[in-house]
Amino acid sequence: MKQTYIWVAFTLLLILNIVLMMRLSHANKRIDSMANSRNEAPHKGGNHERHNEEEEIEVAVVMSHIQRHTNKLFFAGKNANWPLASFYVHELEESMEEIEDGNIEDDGINISKLMKAMGIPALEGLEDAIKAEDTQAFNTAYQQLVTNCNACHQSTNHPYIVIINPTTPALDNQQF
């Protein structure tokens, strides 16, 4: 009799295991189906991952990175923290190159070409000013970056996105 109970328990555990595996498989298929229906690739992690050709770059997300790094760059330059300013120019360049390399068009406007023509060149003046540790040149180059950003927003039919010099850091938990 005791042996019968053991076999019944074993059989029930085996059936339960099979049911759970089937449910897990079904859940994974639903997740994959939902991701495919939105044309999403699985997240691979990392702060600056390059997108595959199949992946669509969300311009607003990259632009928010650019805005945050530009804010931090301003305060690093204002405080003559040249190593930090150099770091943020590099971060800006990576984000801008992501847009440039993304072959992005919106309503017939080539965003990638505009980034190459207006965004990336503005960083050169900043890099030179930072290398020279020249606050006045930095201020001039930063203002050129802001001007180029706003001109690009005008060109892409987003005139309501107006960038200005920040008055406070976007995040207050960093020393500039």
Image: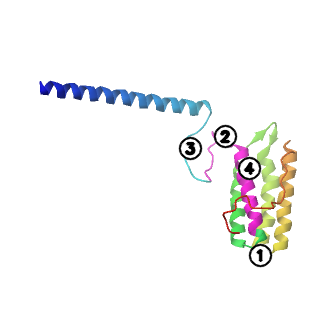
Q: Earlier in the sequence, mark 3 or mark 2?
A: 3
The residue nearer to you, when weighing 114 against 142, is: 142
Q: Position of residue 81 (x, y in %)?
A: 72, 72
Q: Looking at numbered disc 4 in the image, what kind of residue is underneath it? A: Met
- The crowd level at tag 1 (other Cα within 10 Å; few <14, some 14-19, many 20+) is some
- Measuring from the top left, give residue 135's x and y in whole percent: 81, 73
Above or below residue 9? Residue 123 is: below
Residue occupied by mark 2: 56
Secondary structure mostly seen in magenta is: helix
Mark in front: 3 vs 2: 3
Q: Nearer the viewer, mark 2 or mark 1?
A: 1
Q: Could you tell me if the residues under marks 3 and 1 are in contact, i.e. CB atoms within 8 Å?
A: no
For marks 3 and 1 on the same chain, the one whose residue lies earlier in the sequence? 3
Query: Residue drawn at (74%, 42%), measured in percent from left and top?
Result: 104
Q: Amino acid at mark 2?
A: Glu
- 62 or 7, which lies in front? 7
At label 3, the amino acid type is His
Q: Which residue is mark 4?
A: 63
Residue for badge 1: 133
Task: Provide the secondary structure element on which disc 4 rests.
Answer: helix
Please tell me the numbered disc located at residue 43. 3
Q: What's drawn in magenta, residue-wise?
A: 48-76
Q: Nearer the viewer, mark 2 or mark 4?
A: 4
